[in-house]
């Protein structure tokens, strides 16, 4: 079928009809419900994940604006806050319970709902079938369930915000005994139960998705698409899925034990506790530290679950827009593999000061700093990919370059924190906040933005507005550094995290002005994210139409589909693959798609 | 909603509208000019901005350092702290060099190899020598850092000297309780079910028989001193035995660069040697209000941000005078009160009587120096 039909006609229906007529694969008639709600099309599910993720990112970001307001202006009152939030902001001041609820929800929402579901949920769903040449996931039905479990998790988490005693407020790590005892914190009453239920649903969603991604990648690659020919995005999403499948169940087990402690009278995590009310608890012999082991056994791989897909997409976008092959494909795959293995062997570096055996600590230091080696390989390979390329600064490319910059900045401070003797001083200070926000939070977002800007034309058949995209990139880039760079200094001064007011402290009150500055920048950056959200939704309907099926001149298979592919992706046969995905600038040709057979006179690489 | 808020919202909205209109207009202009020309123009602007960001960023990093280097607490006040600071400096130098090198390369390459119609890209899929170099070189530097780090780590977490002062620190929502072993130099037994704030036994010390809990009185507990201030001795190693009554807390000592969690049910320890008295620090920091603070560094509930402890570092002579002036807690909480009220003791046991009696031997904690 011709591209013209797609540009001018109501594209999706045309494609679907053709598909329907030619192949008789889908005999069911698509209704609004099956097409947009309970869809089994991986592309629609990807969009569902993405849009749900955007909504959560908005809420999570808004929470950070609220607590930054408190941190920047601890001595002021904002009466309008009371209008909106009621007793949570009595007298226009954010109450401590609410402050802790905000930071807890901000962390949970952004780590799990945005940077896990919103990031790998979106792009694993969208890219895996398209880039390996499959009509859909191995099990489209499980894939649909994966989204709807995420949706359920979202509803439960959202509802916890409206509980009278407030949502969970013991930090996103939810360490017991604080999270186990309603008597120790209001948020640990109904809030933590809802939090745990929501997270359990989320784990189910993540497992259904992950198993699907793995089986699809292993079994459903098109003819010629060997594992060494798949794009790096797919490798990254593959390792991400493996990490999730192996580590989320451990988290779930930790949560179940916590539920038992809360309601079953068990003592897995509880021992020797007298509540502030004077109540003496009967529990003896439990270990509060056990939860931290179970939590971080997921918690650490989790940060790679966030960053690996970003790395994969950045590699792809960077190669396409440098018009040059990614440097060291096998080294990139090898380093992803090394990171995935090491991800399971470093969890206790979050626990250096819990009283952990110092010898055990030293083993974790060694393994933690080992991660710097594959990370360094990746950074140098990205740099070499840029070297002697012919770079187009599309918004996706800018975010990719920004990602590398942030990954370097945040990765290097990981070398500080992973070294246990430095961690004694820096643990749980603003240094940690600066570190993980740069290397995981903002970098994860940059990877996601790179992906969105790059694949938006494939998702919606339209472009995002470029000018708004450039404003979005530059303000976010500059803002991210302005917010998080100075926090390193607060951390070096030992300023503890999760304090809502430092004015009572002789040791930490010297940063009042800086905190105000950070808060102002954070609000500006948040406003610019709203600009992006606007651009996203506006462009779905009004964006510039994509007029060629391969707008970026890219080698990968998703650009061999029609501009608005229907369910099944390719109207005809699935194309066969003859080469790797990175033949850019080879033999004087700008790009050679994967579908092109190796020429007789073609040089080897 | 106040007028200012509405005003700010209005400005924001206006800003959005203007940005949106400009963005829309520039898209039309782009289409009119042709895709290729627009791309080239945008490319040049962004390449320039990238190099500007690099230069501005590096200047900013330097400026930020000048601005804040005076605010990061100055010299460490413990021997371990000095080691940690030394380690910090080594790490800054190594990671700082890598930071500048890689960021410069990143933005410089981006600027230098920006799109040009004439440029032919260099088809370079891999190069084993290069890849080997940047695997091995970082590995060597990391080995150095790991080596130094672990050397200090084992010194810091190793056993304290035998003559160290031993103090017990217990966290609770939201303050700290300190215990000195008293004249006999032995911490008496305690049991958490014996804790009773109304009876002034905040640590559950077993001063007298508690039949309800199956506890026998421990003489060693009777001279233990419980304080609300931690007093340490200059140049004398101190070992802290850290515990918690409710949730996890953390003894954070910024000036000493030390930190250790307080975990309910699992005692932890740390030791260090203070190098300056509080008075000396007041002079050193030029701050008459200077005080060694204990900050709780592990999220512990709504009062976490205000969970503060005070340490006073004094000379040995001052310490001897101070400790002599402290009465054992048993004296003030039970004996003195009994004299006043002329009532039999046992308030401590009564208040916990509602707790179920366990037949299992109580998990008592006795720590000897």
Image: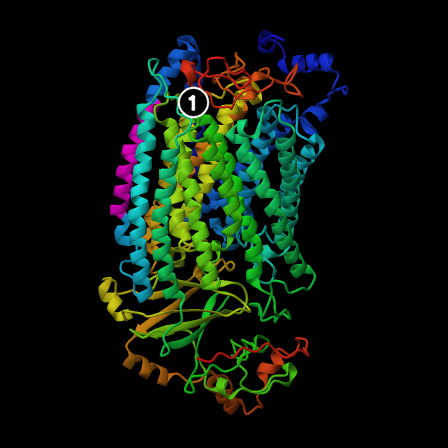
Q: In this view, does B350 lie above or below A302?
A: below
Q: Main secondary structure of the magenta part?
A: helix
**Residue B51 belongs to magenta span:** yes
Q: Hey, which quadrant is residue A469 in on the image?
A: top left
Residue A515 appears anywhere in the view:
no
Q: What element does badge 1 sit on?
A: helix
Q: How many labels does the image show?
A: 1
Rendered image coloring scheme: rainbow
Q: In this view, does A194 lie above or below B308?
A: above
In this rendering, position of residue A504 left or right of residue B1: left
Q: In this view, does A562 lie above or below A339?
A: above
* Residue B327: percent from left, percent from top: 42, 85
Q: Is residue A222 above or below residue B310?
A: above
Extreme residue in the right direction: A27
In this rendering, position of residue A412 left or right of residue A160: left
Residue B67 appears anywhere in the view:
yes
Q: Hey, which quadrant is residue B319 in on the image?
A: bottom left
Parent chain of label 1: A
* Residue B220: percent from left, percent from top: 49, 86
Quadrant location of the C terminus of chain B? bottom left
Nearer to me, A275 or B222: B222
Residue under pointer 1: A321
> What range of the chain is rendered magenta?
B46-67
* Residue A190: percent from left, percent from top: 64, 54
* Residue B263: percent from left, percent from top: 52, 65
Nearer to me, A503 or B42: B42
The local crowd at label 1, few if under 14, some if 14 to 19, many if 20 or more residues have their Cα within 10 Å, is: many
Nearer to me, A110 or A457: A457
Measuring 32% from the left and 41% from the top, which residue is drawn there? B98
Measuring 45% from the left and 86% from the top, which residue is drawn there? B223
């Amino acid at each position: 079928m011709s591209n013209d039909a797609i540009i001018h006609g109501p594209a999706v229906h045309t494609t679907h009809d053709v598909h329907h007529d030619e192949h008789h694969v889908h005999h069911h008639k698509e209704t609004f419900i099956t097409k947009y709600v309970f869809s089994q099309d991986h592309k629609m599910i990807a969009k569902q994940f993405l849009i749900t993720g955007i909504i959560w990112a908005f809420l999570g970001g808004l929470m950070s604006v609220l607590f930054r307001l408190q941190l920047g202006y601890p001595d002021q009152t904002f009466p309008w806050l009371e209008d909106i939030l009621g007793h949570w902001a009595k007298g226009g001041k954010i109450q401590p319970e609410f402050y802790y609820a905000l930071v807890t929800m901000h962390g949970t929402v952004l780590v799990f709902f945005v940077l896990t579901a919103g990031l790998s949920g979106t792009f694993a769903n969208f890219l895996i079938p398209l880039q390996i040449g499959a009509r859909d996931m191995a099990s489209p039905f499980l894939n649909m369930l994966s989204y709807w479990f995420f949706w359920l998790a979202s509803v439960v988490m959202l509802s916890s915000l409206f509980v009278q005693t407030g949502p969970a407020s013991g930090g996103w790590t939810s360490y017991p005994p604080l999270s186990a005892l309603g008597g120790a914190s209001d948020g640990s009453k109904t809030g933590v139960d809802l939090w745990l239920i929501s997270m359990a649903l989320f784990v189910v969603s993540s497992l259904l998705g992950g198993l699907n991604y793995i089986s699809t990648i292993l079994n459903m690659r098109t003819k010629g698409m060997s594992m060494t020919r798949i794009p790096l995005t797919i490798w990254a999403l593959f390792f991400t899925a493996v990490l999730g499948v192996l580590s989320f169940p451990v988290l779930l087990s930790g949560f179940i034990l916590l539920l038992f402690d809360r309601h079953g009278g068990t003592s897995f995590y509880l021992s020797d506790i007298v509540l502030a009310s004077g109540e003496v608890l009967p529990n003896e012999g439990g270990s509060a530290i056990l939860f931290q082991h179970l939590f971080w056994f997921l918690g650490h791989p989790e940060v790679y679950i966030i960053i690996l897909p970003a790395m994969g997409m950045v590699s792809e976008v960077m190669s396409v827009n440098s018009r040059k092959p990614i440097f060291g494909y096998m080294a990139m795959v090898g380093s992803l593999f090394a990171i995935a293995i090491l991800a399971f062997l470093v969890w206790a570096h979050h626990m250096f000061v819990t009283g952990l055996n110092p010898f055990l600590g030293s083993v974790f230091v060694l393994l933690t700093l080992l991660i710097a080696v594959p990370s360094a390989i990746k950074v140098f390979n990205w740099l070499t990919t840029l070297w002697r390329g012919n770079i187009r600064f599309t918004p996706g490319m800018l975010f990719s370059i920004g990602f590398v910059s942030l990954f370097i900045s945040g990765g290097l401070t990981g070398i500080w924190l992973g070294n246990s003797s430095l961690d004694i001083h820096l643990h749980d200070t603003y240094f940690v906040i600066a570190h993980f926000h740069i290397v995981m939070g903002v970098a994860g977002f940059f990877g996601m933005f790179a992906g969105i800007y790059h694949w938006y034309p494939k998702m919606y058949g339209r472009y995002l507005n470029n000018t708004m995209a450039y404003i979005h990139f530059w303000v976010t880039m500059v803002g991210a550094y302005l917010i998080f760079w100075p926090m390193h200094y607060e951390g070096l001064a030992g300023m503890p995290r999760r304090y809502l007011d430092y004015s009572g402290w002789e040791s930490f009150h010297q940063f009042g002005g800086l905190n105000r500055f950070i808060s102002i920048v954070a609000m500006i950056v948040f406003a610019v994210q709203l600009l992006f959200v606007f651009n996203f939704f506006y462009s779905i309907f009004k964006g510039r139409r994509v007029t060629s099926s391969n707008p970026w001149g890219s080698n990968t298979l998703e650009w061999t589909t029609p501009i608005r592919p229907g369910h099944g992706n390719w109207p005809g046969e699935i194309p066969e693959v003859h080469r790797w995905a990175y033949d850019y600038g080879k033999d004087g040709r700008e790009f050679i798609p994967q579908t092109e057979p190796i020429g007789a006179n073609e040089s080897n690489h | 909603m106040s007028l200012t808020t509405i005003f700010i919202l209005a400005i924001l909205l206006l800003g959005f509208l203007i940005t949106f209109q400009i963005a829309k207009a520039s898209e039309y202009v782009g289409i009119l000019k042709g895709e290729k020309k627009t791309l080239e123009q945008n490319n040049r602007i962004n390449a320039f901005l990238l190099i500007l960001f690099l230069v501005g960023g590096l200047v900013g990093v330097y400026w930020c350092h000048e601005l804040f280097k005076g605010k990061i607490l100055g010299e460490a006040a413990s021997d371990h702290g000095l080691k940690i600071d030394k380690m910090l400096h080594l790490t800054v130098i190594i990671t700082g060099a890598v930071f500048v090198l890689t960021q410069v390369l990143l933005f410089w390459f981006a600027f230098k190899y920006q799109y040009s119609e004439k440029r032919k890209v260099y088809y370079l899929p891999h190069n084993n020598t290069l890849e080997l170099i940047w695997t091995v070189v970082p590995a060597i530097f990391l080995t150095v850092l790991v080596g130094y780090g672990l050397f200090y780590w084992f010194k810091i977490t190793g056993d304290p000297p035998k003559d160290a002062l031993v103090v017990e620190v217990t966290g609770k929502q939201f303050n700290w309780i300190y215990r000195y072993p008293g004249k006999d130099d032995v911490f008496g037994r305690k049991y958490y079910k014996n804790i009773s704030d109304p009876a002034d036994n905040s640590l559950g010390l077993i001063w007298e028989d508690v039949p309800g809990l199956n506890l026998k009185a421990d003489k060693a507990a009777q001279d233990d001193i419980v304080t609300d201030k931690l007093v340490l001795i200059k140049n004398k190693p101190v070992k802290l035995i850290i515990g918690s009554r409710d949730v996890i807390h953390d003894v954070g000592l910024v000036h000493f660069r030390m930190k250790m969690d307080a975990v309910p049910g699992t005692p932890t320890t740390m030791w260090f040697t203070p190098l300056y008295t509080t008075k000396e620090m007041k002079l050193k920091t030029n701050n008459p209000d200077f005080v060694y603070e204990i900050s709780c560094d592990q999220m512990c509930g709504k009062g976490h941000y205000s969970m503060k402890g005070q340490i006073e570092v004094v000379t040995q002579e001052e310490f001897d005078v101070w400790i002599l002036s402290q009465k054992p807690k048993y004296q003030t909480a039970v004996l003195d009160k009994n004299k006043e009220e002329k009532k039999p003791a046992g308030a401590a046991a009564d208040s916990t009587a509602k707790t179920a009696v366990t037949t299992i031997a109580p998990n008592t904690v006795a720590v000897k120096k």
